Image (cartoon, rainbow, N blue to C red):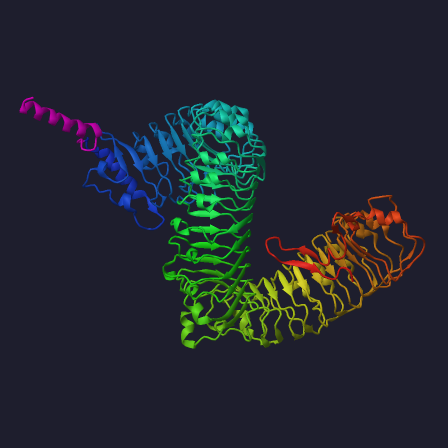
Amino acid sequence: MSHLLRSLLYSLFLLSIFFGNGKFLATARCLDEQSSLLLQLKANLSFSLGLIPSKISSWDSNTDCCSWEGVTCDDNVGHVIGLNLSSEFISGGIDNSSSLFSLRYLQNLNLAINAFNSSPIPSGFDRLLHLTTLNLSNSGFGGQIPIEFSRLTRLVSLDLSTLFVGELPLKLEQPGLKELIQNLSELRTLSLDGVNISAPGSYWAQALSSSVPNLQVLGLSNCHLSGPLDFSLSNLRFLSDIRLDLNDISAEVPEFFANFTNLTSLSLSSCGLRGKFPEKILQLRTLQTLDVSVNPKLGGSLPEFPKGASFRMLRLSGTSFTRELPDSIGNLKFLTSLEIWSCNFYGAIPVSLVRLTKLVSLDLSSNNFSGTVPWLGLPENLAEIFLYNNRLTGSIHSVPWNRFLKLENLHLRNNSLTGTIPSSLFTLPSLKQLHLAHNQFVGPLSESSNASLSPLAVLDLSSNNLEGPIPTSFFELQNLATLLLSFNNFNGTVHLENIQKLGNLSSLDLSYNRLSVNTSVSDASLSSFPEIGVLSLASCNLTEFPSFLRINQPIIRFLDLSNNKIHGVVPNWIWNVGNGLLVHLNLSCNFLDHLEEPLPNPNYSSGLVTIDLHSNLLQGPLPILSSSAVYLDYSNNNFTSTIPANISSYLSYTIFFSVSNNRLHGEIPTSICNASYLQVLDLSNNNLSHMIPTCLGSITWTLRVLNLGHNNFKGSIPQTFPVGCGLRTLDLNGNVLEGSVPTTLGNCKMLEVLDLGNNQINDTFPFWLESLLQLRVLILRSNHFHGPIRSTKTDHTFPSLQIIDLSSNDFVGNLSSEIFLSWKAMTVEGDEIQSEHKIETVKFKFLEFSQVYYQDSDANK
């Protein structure tokens, strides 16, 4: 080949590169008209940050508009065919008169992620008849989507979705979905997530199937849609991505989704789904993402997965899926996230997880998995391991933790893991959260080297059997924000100078060990002491209030100094700790004898939700410390006063109120009946007298525990227990009550404990109480009950009764053996005896998301 020919071919090769990829081709210059329109658009725009962002700031009349950032021109004439103004903080300047709508050759327009402050979408979009892609997602527009969009018949992709609900969210009412898409037959992508469509299943499904038969991506999450999933959806056979989350579908999942041969993603979380999930969908080879989480009525099980399955993400959390994990889960070799928390799975964790080499997130928490964890088989790329709230056993000491160099979160809380905790866990290079609480770990903890380099932010070892001193290396964890070591057997002395080293510390719990905490800190050190939000030093041998609380804790919201040896006065500065942010204060079980004056104005200490002063030596009048407390416990003190007549003014939000075991006197003010949120009211073991207010019966809609025992109340028991009464415990023992047992107590269908002992009640045996199916304890001793003891039924009387005390009354006649035989809850079943020893306490949990409960510990008195 001649030199000339080689040169010619080489030149042609270079030209093919330049012209073929269009990168170096000399394109047509932007037309003056197009440049002028863009500059006019720039001049009219306004921005939420007050500054012109990066893209638009590059627009300069002295340069070719085709070179401007965010602008795309065609290669021949110089028309602007693409405009990307996403994430520019645009807040205004686009209305029907905008020059934007004169860029009539636009094919692609992106205004996503802006800040139009709920202004309506301009109708002028219908002038952009060449648009194939329109993206207004998260742009801040609000109100009705204009019908003019239906004229954009060349649209292939339309995205109006929003993750943020403003004052005026986008909606499709008049016109509706059908009218919007009826002419958009070219659509392949339709994303309306977050748009209020409010339509039944037959309407929106049929509108889609009849108008956009070639649709591939469908995003209708959080659109206020209802079910069922109409069969007409099966006509959209090209669908690959379906998002219907956060709608009220309330129906079964149809099996026809398994016929979508292109389906790669199906998201149906929080839709009220029910029934059994079709296994055929789970066996689709194309499916990469399945999210049906938070559908508690949706059941099913995992099938045998075929080899070659494409799953990347599998989310079944918050459903009723059950059975064991199949060993074939190891066939999902592309899986990066397996999230099945809070289901009903059980059995062993399969060793086949070793084959999931791409797995990054593993969440099997809150199931019934048992046995040991196949640690050696877990993929090294894991960043998150959540196995808490199961029944897992075994040791973690010999696990080669240095394999997991990317591990950020390890949650093993609430299992039955044993053995010692390896020190290498505390210095993993990526680990930020370590939760090992509520297990059976033992032994002392070893010191860790290079702790100062650890990113560990959360360390929870509470409720184990750990012992020995707290490692000094813990106080070198510079990133530590949460340190929870309560309910162990740690010993020794903790000096606050060590805690002071943890500059990022925000939560500290050393309670219920064998520790002594030295709270003295030099004044010079206070300025550098960490600002703690949660501080729990219960049972830490404190003898005084920590002085650093008074000077340098501006953000504290939870303070527990209970079960210590603090004597004397409660200083009045304690109410100002945290600059009004203090929510929980527990000073119970100390030796405090009075509250320093002046007491806080209850109307200005409204932040306090929990005040617990029980089991001290406090005296004087009953204190009023907050007007918005939810939990008030002043029991087991020496308060001597009447209950304030306006007590309900300070119980507006109170759920728990106990002043038992004091020396209060006088009557119960009727205003207490206005405390409409009360669930527990305990005034027992005082010197209260007069009659029980009749209105107390009227608040038993919410009241669960009413304990007025061991006072001097007289008169009769209130007759006003309404239909729907929710009482679980009624204790009137040890008063001077007369009359009969009110039959309206039969309205209290949830009643478990009824104690009327040691009064002067004159009545026959109240066998009508046998209709209370939950009644476990019935105490009638030492009254004037009389007559025979007979049942109106032959069997199934008092089906839950475990304790009954009829002693010291005036009953006559024979006790039929049939009565005792009918009380099934007292009988022996196998080796288990249902007796008073089995229910020496009766507990009622009254704060749903806490560990707090009311305990009736004297149910058989």
Is residue 390 in the magenta section?
no
Position of the N terminus by quadrant: top left
Along the viewing direction, whichever of 733 and 367 lies nearer the viewer: 367
| Residue name at image x 43 percent, y 76 percent | 522
In the rendered image, the vertical position of residue 789 relative to residue 469, given as above or below: above
Query: Furthest residue to the left?
Result: 3
Along the viewing direction, whichever of 621 and 37 lies nearer the viewer: 621
Location of residue 451 (image quadrant):
bottom left
- x and y, in percent, of residue 783 in the image: 87, 62
Query: Furthest residue to the bottom?
Result: 568
| Residue name at image x 50 percent, y 70 percent | 492
Main secondary structure along the magenta-highlighted residues: helix
Q: Is residue 651 left or right of residue 68?
A: right
Is residue 5 in the magenta section?
yes
Location of residue 502 (image quadrant):
bottom left
**Residue 495 shows in the view:** yes
**Residue 597 shows in the view:** no
In the rendered image, the vertical position of residue 162 relative to residue 625, given as above or below: above
Along the viewing direction, whichever of 638 and 289 lies nearer the viewer: 289
Query: Furthest residue to the front?
Result: 398
- x and y, in percent, of residue 476 in the image: 40, 64
**Which region shows up in magenta?**
1-26
- x and y, in percent, of residue 802 in the image: 78, 53
Position of the C terminus by quadrant: bottom right
